[in-house]
Image (spheres, helix red, strand yellow):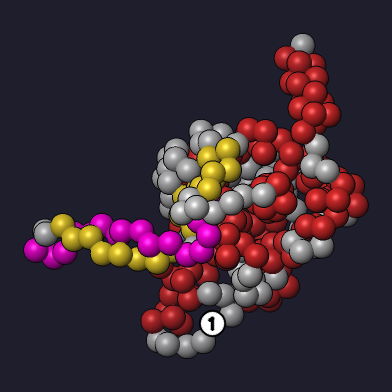
Amino acid sequence: MFSFFKNWNRDRVLRKHRIPDDLWKALIGEVRAARHLSVIDIDRLRDTAALFLYEKSIEPAQGLVITDAMQARIACEAAIPVLNLGLIYYRLWYSVIVYPEAFVARDVYVDEAGVLHTQPSTRMGEAWSRGPVIISWEDVVSHPAGSNVIIHEMAHKLDMLDGVANGRPPMQPGMDQYHWTVAFSEAFAVHTAQVEAGYPTEIDAYAAKSPAEFFAVTSEVFFETPRVLQSVWPEVYKQLALYYRQRP
Ligand SMILES: [Zn+2]
């Protein structure tokens, strides 16, 4: 009975809030991370994006004017990681705040003497635990191959589902946490050593910042340039394919 009402409500929302044909057709060709999807999957993505817009609030910052096309683009990219998982994976938070371009946040840290400092830091995106996702619109529309600020921040949200951003989201049924930990910790250790030694790396050096950033950055590469991840870290690709239930 519960699933009957759930489906009825879903159909009702989709009838009323479907993303219009012209908007969808104009945007889907721009979304590199959706290229691996079949025609049927693209239709499901459109539904998931519409439901995302129904459930979440997309809020402008610094005077940005957000059009329907911008909302649809954000929802489409946010829907990609959870296409085969469901929007339940984005529970416990409500809004996406959109800045026109990279924004300045304040990093807080304690030095060796125990003194608290704050320093400005420029960001393309941010995900707060149980709070909003913040993104820079400029970085949504223009980004280098392999990067995707929306997928990056959504990966942090998935990681935080068990309360801690540690680079290991709650495993899917049937997944073995041991295999995940081995694949990710080996790749992270090698990547960090390469970055510290000043070697050029195929995966963004930023991934060396922490295991949480490594998961978010490899999730971007998984959807944007999957062949790169498959050749550099095949075991990480395999674990992400099991986690996201997709094989880009
Ligand atoms: Zn991050």
What's the magenta bit mostly, secondary-structure-wise?
A: strand
Residues rendered magenta in the picture: 98-113
- In the rendered view, would you say 107 is above or below 208? above
Along the horizontal axis of the image, is 44 left or right of 174?
right
Q: Position of residue 125 (x, y in %)?
A: 49, 58
Q: Nearer the viewer, residue 104 or 186?
A: 104
Quarter that holds the N terminus: top right
- In the rendered view, would you say 94 is above or below 72? above
Residue at point 63%, 33% (across, down) = 55
Q: Position of residue 154 (x, y in %)?
A: 57, 50
Along the horizontal axis of the image, is 99 left or right of 86?
left
204 in the magenta segment: no
Residue linked to disc 1: 201
- In the rendered view, would you say 185 is above or below 162? below
Residue at point 43%, 75% (across, down) = 192
Which residue extends farthest top? Answer: 1
Residue at point 90%, 52% (across, down) = 39
Quarter that holds the C terminus: bottom right
Q: Is residue 9 visible?
A: yes
